[in-house]
Amino acid sequence: MDDEIDGPFKATVEELRELMELRRGEAITEIKNRYGDVQELCSRLKTSPTQGLRGLAADMTRRVTTYGKNIIPPKPPKTFLRLMWEAIQDVTLIMLIIAALISLGLSFIPKQHKEGGAESEAEWFEGVAILVAILIVVLVTAFNDYSKERQFRGLKDKLDQEHKMSVIRAGEIVQIIVADIVVGDIAICKYGDLLPADGVIIHSNDLKIDESSLTGESDSIKKGVDTDPMLLSGTHVMEGSGKFVVTAVGLHSQTGQIFSLLLGGDKKKSGPAKVKVEDGNEEAAVGTYSKGKQRCVCFSLRTHYRTVNYLKCS
């Protein structure tokens, strides 16, 4: 087993990524032509299908350096100023800003002195009051979104720490945090598991996977060495169990690649929707934002008109 630590890996990151893009018959053919079988793939990754990795620190470090760590870095949080800028893009607020500027501009146009001097003096206050109301709406909305984003990130970090997977290390089945999984680990999956990394099946027992989060297929897909040996991160085990060798982790996995594309698309403002795990939070945030905004607008405008009426009467 010394070759596990000292010998070079005979499978590159690019090679494994190309392999994981194949499905069913194409994947079986590629494994047979390039490696012969899954046992040979394990050999090239310096791991044992039955004993797994030794778990030595030097070997773990070398695998992380070569193939990466099983962590997908979170999207950078939006700053408070960015959230304020997004809040002010609302059509209603833009119309109010235009109305406030027009009102403020008209208030400075010289007028002939008429009865009701207090009313004339209070005209400038209307525009200012509208702008103050808009500022309140923007601040409240931005603070609400900022708080919810922090809560969501905290919950996600907590779930990541609690998510564990069974792997074989030194011939024993152990539970480890998914972030500690490395390429070459022999992982065991069962009903209800969320797969944390890409891998190739060594053997399975009536294994069916829900890949709808990645491929959109609503039906569970039967997996096996002779049917479809590819397991993808982010998919759920619906039936059966299996053992597989991890071939891609983190940003090199299928989920990681999709996340990278989405992040790049967001920067260009041309990407599709966010990763599915965030959709519920996003929709909830939008709903809360709209209701909160409406309440703030109504409250602010009510206050504005009462103040103006009071000045006019006085």
Image (tube, rainbow, N blue to C red):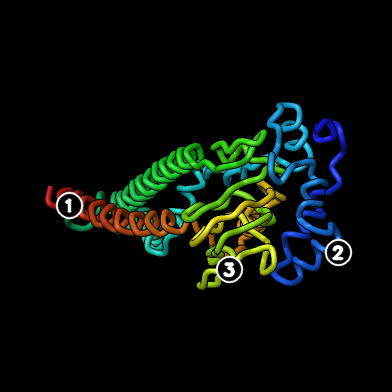
Left or right: 197, with 89 as reference point: right
Residue type at tag 1: Arg
Question: To which quarter of the image does residue 291 belong?
Answer: bottom left
x then y, percent, for residue 248: 70, 50
In depth, the one of 70 and 2 nearer the eye is 2
In the structure shown, which secondary structural element does the residue marked by tag 3 occupy?
strand
In depth, the one of 240 and 275 nearer the eye is 240
In depth, the one of 274 and 212 nearer the eye is 212
Residue at image coords 84%, 59% = 36
Tell me the number on the disc at residue 154: none
Q: Around disc 1, counting alpha carbons within 10 Å, would you say few (fewer than 14), some (14 to 19), or many (20 or more)?
A: few
Question: To which quarter of the image does residue 33 belong?
Answer: bottom right
Residue ranking furthest to the top: 57
The residue beneath circle 2 is 33
Residue 32 appears in the figure: yes
Left or right: 168, with 57 as reference point: left
In depth, the one of 155 and 109 nearer the eye is 155
In the structure shown, which secondary structural element does the residue marked by tag 2 occupy?
helix
Whether 25 is drawn above or below 65: the answer is below
Image quadrant for the N terminus?
top right
x then y, percent, for residue 34: 86, 60
Residue type at tag 3: Lys
The residue beneath circle 1 is 306
